[in-house]
Every structure is written in structure tokens, then in C-alpha cells.
Image (tube, rainbow, N blue to C red):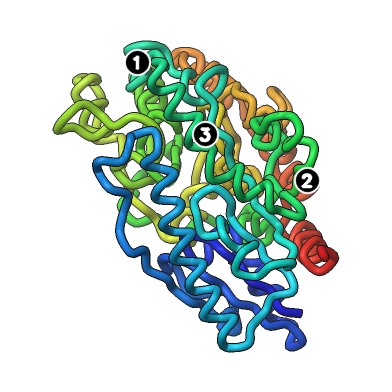
Amino acid sequence: MKILFLHRFFPAQYRHVAAALAADPANEVRFVAAEREAEPADPRVRLSLYMRSRAAHPTTHHYLQFAENAVLHGQAAFRQMRALAAEGFRPDVICAHAGFGPGMFAADAFPGVPIIAYAEWFYRARNSDADFLPLGVDGGSAVSDDDACRLRLRNAGILVELAAATRILSPTQFQRDQFPPGIRERIEVLHDGVDTEYFAPGPAGPVPGLAIPREAPLVTYATRGLDPYRGFPEFMRAAAILLRQHPGLQVAVAGEDKVFYGAQAPAGETWRSQMLKELPGLDTGRVHFLGALSLADYRALLRRSTVHVYLTVPFVLSWSLIEAMATGAAIVASDTAPVREAMRDGQEGLLAPFTSPEAIAARIARILSTESLRADLTRAARMAALARYSRKSLLPQHVSVIESTQ
């Protein structure tokens, strides 16, 4: 079988399924992308990189900037696919991460080949991520008419791709439900899965930049970037409350000091510098900013954690929440729709209102003071991760979807 994967970044969500397919010598696996982020999990996955002719032109209407960039990626990927065709490669199935361009013209590059689209997010101006943060708080603002029109046009590329798709996958029910009726009914929910054998309870080991007393309770926070969409400001406000209440407590923050989602900090600031300015009494000697961690160091941090905090606006659910569950962390998380799909309040974790640092701190304090609760939560979180999100059980399902699509 010949399989083609399309994504702006290599290998991204397709890392493990591409490797699983490439491990079968009867398969030929190709990947077309704009950028290489990591080495393949299996060297038999053959990568072809494309280059856009240019970026979106600055004079293009701002509603269409995102769409123009998607078209430019699609055009470049189309040319790369035509080059593969000229070499004699014709896939039996195409897997494309939809909405950002590489798969936009896949149906034209290889007419008649079935396409499995990965539907990650559908943009909405109301009752979703864009209008979730309160006005004037952490970049929260009213969604203007201009914003609403711009966000609607961000869906243009994904709608083009989904119209051509044979099957559509989305990792969570919440993400599926963002799509409009008609498309939503076509989407199959199938999570990517996490490595629950790697992310498992065990001895912590040292974490670079974290030199704290062995017996000290540790509250952890780990995201890709320190930004409002993942509740970094709310976490820091909650941490400030806890540090005043618990003299021996330590706090560790992992993640790059930059924004990946949502609003930028005020001019000249990052959200880290902004929060340190907002919280002048913060005991910074007990707050450890670790930056981006390797996978092993990140796992060690989760294992060392007494309470792990995960916060998100109603947006794409981070794999990190499932990884923390699988590692057996005691978790306090935001009471938002994507989180509620993965855990129940009082069962696999404790949930708190996203916008209430006081409530978040109180939930953390409850776990810190109740060892039996902590034990119950960690056990249930691990069991839920194994039952619903284990890559070991989900990866064969992904392979089956690809092999059965025609």
C-alpha cells in the first residue's frame, strides 16, 4: 500500500501512524511538508520538503491573509505532489492535516485518490475561544464585527479540504462539535493517543533548573508557551496565593516565554514579565522557570509534581493533560468543555473556574492537605488515560482507518 501524509510540519500528529505503516515492508510511506521539526520515528518514512513562492502579500485584505497563506502552501505542496507523480508514485490514500494549506489541492494532484482529513479546529467568533476571556483581562477583548468576519474567513481553507475528503477525523468530541452541522456528522472522533507506557508513574530523577528540598511539595505547570489561552496569568495569580499560605511550597513552570495562542502581552513585555510586574510580592526564590524541557525532563517534572495544573480556554485540548493523567499526576484543571471531556471533577482531577485564581488555589490547597484524595485522583487519572487515550490501543485503529479507506 502507498500512503501520502500532508502537513505543514513534519512529522507532527502523523509521527507514530506514519512509522507504524512504514514498518510494514509492503507499504511505501511518503510525507510532504514545509518544515522538518524532528526526525521520523521510522527512517523508512520518506520526506519531501516544499517551499512557498512567497508569503501572503501585505496589501491583501486582512480577512484573506490566512487564506492566501494556505493557498500558497497548497500550491507549493501541489507542485511537490506532481513531482512525486512524475517519479511514478501514486498513493492509495492521502492523510492531510486540513485548513493550513498542504492538502488544499491534493484531490487535483492525485484525482480519485481517497483523502482522510484531520479536522483540528473550526473558528468561531461567539461562544468559543475568541470571546472567552473577560474584557480587559489578559488580552481579553470584545469580538468586533471586523474580528467576526476575519475569523469566519479563516475557515475557508478547511472547508475546501473537507469538501474533498473521503473521511474526516477529529481527536476529541469537543473539537468535532465546533464544526457546523452537515460537516460535524461526517467527522469520526479518534484521539491520537499518548504513550502511556512512557508516561507512567515512576521515580522522578533530576530536572534541570529545579534544585529544591527533597521533601518540598511542588506545584507544576507545563505548556508549550506562557500565554493566556493556557491560563498562565491565572496560574501565576493562584501560585502567589499559595506561596503566601504554604511556606515550604515550591512552584515550577515549564514552557517557552512566548505566545503560541491568543493575545500578545502589552508592548515590550512577555506574559512572564507582565505577571512578575503585576505580582511584586511574589517569592521568586520559590518559583522556578524551567523553559522548554526535553521529553525525559518533562516526564521527570510530572513525576516529581505534588499537584499539576492544566488550564485552557475552550480550545484544542493539549496532549499534556493526557500525559499528566497517564503519569499519575494529581491534577487541578480548568472547568472548561475540552477538559470536562477528559476528566470528571472529583474523580480524575479537581476542576476550577478558569478565571478564578482564588478557586484554582483552593483546589490545589485541598490536594496538598489531603493525601488520600491525592492518591485517589492519581489512580483514577492513570486508569482513565489507559482506558481512553493509550496510543497502544488507538494506533491500530488509526492504521485500520487508513487501510480500509478507499
Instruction: Check if mark 1's residue and mark 3's residue have beta carbons within 8 Å.
Output: no
Name the kind of residue labelled 3 in the image. Answer: Tyr
> Is tag 1's residue or tag 3's residue first in the polypeptide sequence?
1
What residue is shown with label 3? 310
**In the shown orientation, is residue 24 left or right of residue 271?**
right
Secondary structure under the numbered disc 3 in the rendered image? strand
211 or 123, which lies in front? Answer: 123
Specify the label residue 188 is tagged with: 2
Foreground residue among 301 and 177: 177
Disc 1 marks which amino acid?
Val
Q: Residues within 10 Å of mark 3 (few under 14, many from 20)?
A: many
User: Residue at coordinates 51% horizontally, 60% vertically from top-left?
Assistant: 102
Judge from the rendering whether residue 54 lies leftward or rightward of residue 322; answer left or right. left
Quadrant in which residue 245 is drawn: top left
Q: Residue 382's mark?
A: none
What residue type is disc 2 on?
Glu
- Horizontal and vertical percent position of residue 124: 54, 26
Q: CA distance from mark 2 to mark 1?
A: 36 Å
Q: Residue at x 54, y 76 (%)?
A: 82
Residue 161, image x, y percentages: 62, 50
